[in-house]
């Protein structure tokens, strides 16, 4: 496992880390015992960073992380997120009282005294521009409740704005082979500013595993069913904003990327971007963790391959992406 500095912070995190949305909920059936085994397998392989949120299974993902990392607080870093358990458009959600309550609840579930990276969870742009929440986060940082803070953003414009907020040390951004827009402006500027990048939805909700066929169905409680057209939250969080059948069609055109299987190749593509701190794929099973981890050992993409992927994105994919980004 290789490690990368999270922006200009004191944290060095595994370049292949993991998100915990799937083991918390909204991805169909999951098994807690298997989830904990997956976390343990990842840590044994050198993963030292996990991303979670208070709304992943109403805190269940945080509880699983707390259980799996108990006694490893100095070795394993955790990023969590807040605000979407409330009304994300209401300023009161971002008041000192509310943010402090979110933070304390997160800490309790994680069984920790400090959150390594506390992120605002895809707030509306007007909330970011208002700026009051950052004063609250500065206060919590001074008190030692959080180590660093960042923002999970939906758009490049939001990300660029956050780069000018002094203590924002990380941005969490949707990025994958089928969602390359942040490459062109946001990532270079983040690098210059010393801001880390966490690449979420790296497998486009499974499209880039190559295992789906057109017309596939998903469980009722899986966001790939109830949010496939953006009915519950930003459509970009599901299949990267692509209509499912079109996404399957596009992913099939990428089978040439090789490298053992599409999952590893898709993650390798992300790791080949110097400005990215880490990719955070999700998982529900040990096998999925094991498969993703092998991405660190497969060959990097050549300049010619990267150019081919960029051309494919610009000519075949970009116009089909729905939602703000």
Image: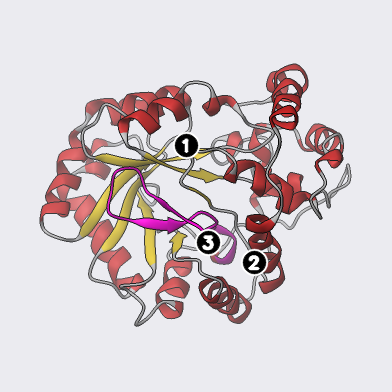
Q: Of residues 64 and 4, which is closer to you in this image?
A: 4
Determine crowd level at label 2: few under 14, some 14-19, many 20+ residues with C-alpha closer than 10 A. Answer: many
Q: Say left or right for 199 vs 106.
A: right
Is the residue 236 above or below the residue 42 in the image?
above
Is the residue 87 above or below the residue 67 in the image?
above
Q: Of residues 83 and 87, which is closer to you in this image?
A: 83
Q: Nearer the viewer, mark 3 or mark 1?
A: 1
Q: Say left or right for 124 vs 179.
A: left
Q: Label 2 belongs to which residue?
A: 289
Instruction: Give the CA distance from mark 1 to mark 2.
Output: 24 Å
Magenta region: 1-23
Determine crowd level at label 3: few under 14, some 14-19, many 20+ residues with C-alpha closer than 10 A. Answer: many
**Which numbered tag is attached to residue 232?**
none
Q: Of residues 251 and 275, which is closer to you in this image?
A: 275
Which residue is at 54% across, 73% downward?
A: 39
Q: Is residue 203 visible?
A: no
Q: Label 1 belongs to which residue?
A: 275
Q: Tag 2's secondary structure?
A: helix
Q: Label 3 belongs to which residue?
A: 20
Q: Tag 1's secondary structure?
A: loop
In the rendered image, residue 8, in percent from the top left (x then y), is placed at: 29, 43
Instruction: Give the CA distance from mark 3 to mark 1.
Output: 23 Å
Image quadrant assignment for residue 320: top right
The quadrant of the picture occupied by the N terminus is bottom right
Q: Give the mark, 2 or 3, whose residue is nearer the N terminus.
A: 3
Image quadrant assignment for residue 58: bottom left
In the rendered image, residue 167, in percent from the top left (x then y), is placed at: 22, 39
Q: Of residues 299 and 45, which is closer to you in this image?
A: 299
Q: Is residue 15 magenta?
A: yes
Which residue is at 55% across, 56% downward?
A: 16
């Amino acid at each position: 496992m290789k490690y990368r500095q999270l922006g200009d912070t004191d944290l060095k995190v595994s370049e292949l880390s993991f998100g915990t949305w799937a083991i918390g909920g909204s991805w169909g059936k999951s098994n807690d015992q298997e989830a904990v085994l997956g976390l343990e397998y990842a840590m044994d392989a050198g993963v030292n960073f996990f991303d979670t949120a208070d709304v992943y299974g109403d805190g269940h993902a945080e509880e699983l992380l707390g259980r799996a990392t108990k006694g490893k607080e100095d070795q394993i870093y955790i990023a969590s997120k807040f605000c979407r358990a409330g009304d994300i458009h209401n300023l009161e959600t971002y008041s000192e009282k509310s943010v402090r309550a979110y933070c304390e609840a997160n800490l309790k579930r994680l069984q920790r005294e400090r959150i390594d990276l506390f992120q605002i969870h895809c707030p509306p742009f007007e909330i970011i521009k208002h700026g009051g929440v950052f004063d609250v986060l500065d206060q919590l940082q001074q008190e030692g409740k959080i180590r660093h803070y960042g923002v999970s953003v939906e758009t490049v414009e939001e990300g660029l704005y956050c780069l000018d907020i002094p203590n924002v040390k990380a941005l969490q951004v949707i990025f994958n082979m089928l969602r390359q827009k942040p490459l062109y402006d946001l990532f270079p500027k983040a690098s210059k500013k010393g801001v880390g990048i966490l690449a979420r939805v790296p497998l486009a909700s499974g499209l880039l595993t190559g295992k789906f066929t057109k017309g596939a169905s998903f469980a009722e409680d899986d966001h790939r069913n109830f949010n496939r057209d953006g009915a519950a939250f930003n459509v970009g969080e599901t299949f990267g904003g692509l209509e499912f059948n079109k996404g399957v069609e596009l992913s099939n055109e990428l089978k040439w990327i090789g490298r053992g299987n599409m999952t590893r190749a898709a993650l390798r593509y992300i790791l080949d971007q110097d400005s990215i701190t880490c990719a955070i794929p999700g998982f529900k099973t040990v096998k999925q963790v094991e498969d993703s981890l092998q991405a660190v050992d497969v060959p990097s993409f050549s300049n010619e391959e990267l150019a081919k992927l960029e051309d494919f994105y610009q000519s075949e994919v970009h116009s089909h992406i729905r939602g703000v980004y």
